[in-house]
Image: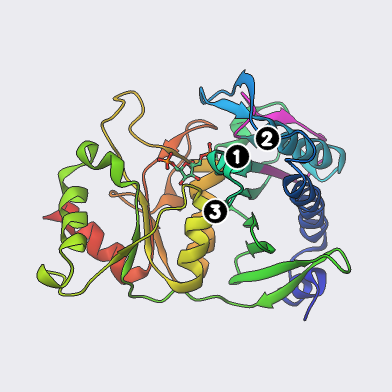
Amino acid sequence: MQRLAPALREDNVPLDLISLIKTVLAATKEISFRVSQAHLGGLMGSTLDENIQGEIQKKLDVVANELFKDILLESGFVKAISSEEEDSSVPGDENGKFIVSFDPLDGSSNIDINSLIGTIFSIHEAPKGMAADDPDMFKQAGNKQVCAGYVLYGPSTMLVMTTGKGTHFYVLDRTHGGYLLVERNVRIPEDTQEFAINMSNQRFWHPAMKNYIDDLILGDTGPRGKNFNMRWIAAMVGDVHRVLCRGGIFTYPADSKNPNKPYKLRLMYEANPMSFLVEQAGGLSVTSEGRIMDIEPTSIHQRVEVILGSKNEVETCLSYYKK
Ligand code: AFP
């Protein structure tokens, strides 16, 4: 099995980006270890603090964020970072060539039940002529990402990454301490009989989404003429990983539960990187109005509707909004 750096060189990834990716992955290896030891190390449960999103931070969220932040900012490759757990962007090296957005631990509600969690990251080039402490550097569309990925802390620690030349799977080999390429150019099947949505929000959805899901549930007795199964891991990393492995549609649609917060998922460090991975694997990733990676961001913690996965199923879902 191929090691990470030669695999990246084969895809002609520039050397400075390879160095940054290795830095990102150094942080994930340490987070993977801390996650596996969380109970023993007193890292279960919550802190007393809220993050900028108004969510109570888990102890492991804070540890993962500090680790990621320190390693990236000390590397010299990074001009600034933005994180789900930071109020604003954090400046790094003025000469750093890249900016990195990340969710240090996605799926925090799974921490205390020893279930799937992961780290999501997105890398852009730092715009020239802007200071490291200028948060506007992060106002770049997802279609300008030079690399995106996630690390899933599951039964094996798995890296899923793209630099725009396909989406590849790697597994952390603990015997030598590095990630090994296990599957190149993953493809998402175009059709599926599996969907992922938080059904408890059903009464708050747009009528188009309600009608679409109703038809999936009717199965072979309804207009779709086939049965669908449902899965919900409550961690986008886990749900998107399943879609990349065997197809499916994953959505967190707009809802009217809280009129000030119509969307749940974050554009910069959840929706954009996952969209890059899904599109590079032949899937679609959209809102009910258009391609996610074409959205021009207005703020670091911006939220967005997400509908992604198997191409034909995402198109079928969108057709309900046009009816
Ligand atoms: P955190 O990043 O705060 O852990 O949230 C996880 C998440 O944003 C995403 O990964 C899940 O798909 C979604 O929330 C789960 O939301 P529900 O609470 O509605 O299940």
Q: Amino acid at mark 1?
A: Asp
Tell me the CA gap for discs 1 and 3. 17 Å
**Is the magenta region chiefly helix, strand or loop?**
loop
**Furthest residue toward bottom:** 1
Q: Are marks 3 and 2 in contact (CB under 8 Å)?
A: no
Q: Which one is earlier in the sequence, the residue at label 2 or at label 1?
A: 2
Magenta part of the chain: 84-100
Ligand 1 contact, mark 3 (Cβ < 8 Å): yes
Residue linked to disc 3: 237
Secondary structure at numbered mark 1: helix
Residue linked to disc 2: 44
Residue linked to disc 1: 112
112 on left or right of 178:
left
Q: Nearer the viewer, residue 200 or 189?
A: 200
Secondary structure at numbered mark 2: loop
Q: In which image quadrant can residue 316 be found?
A: bottom left
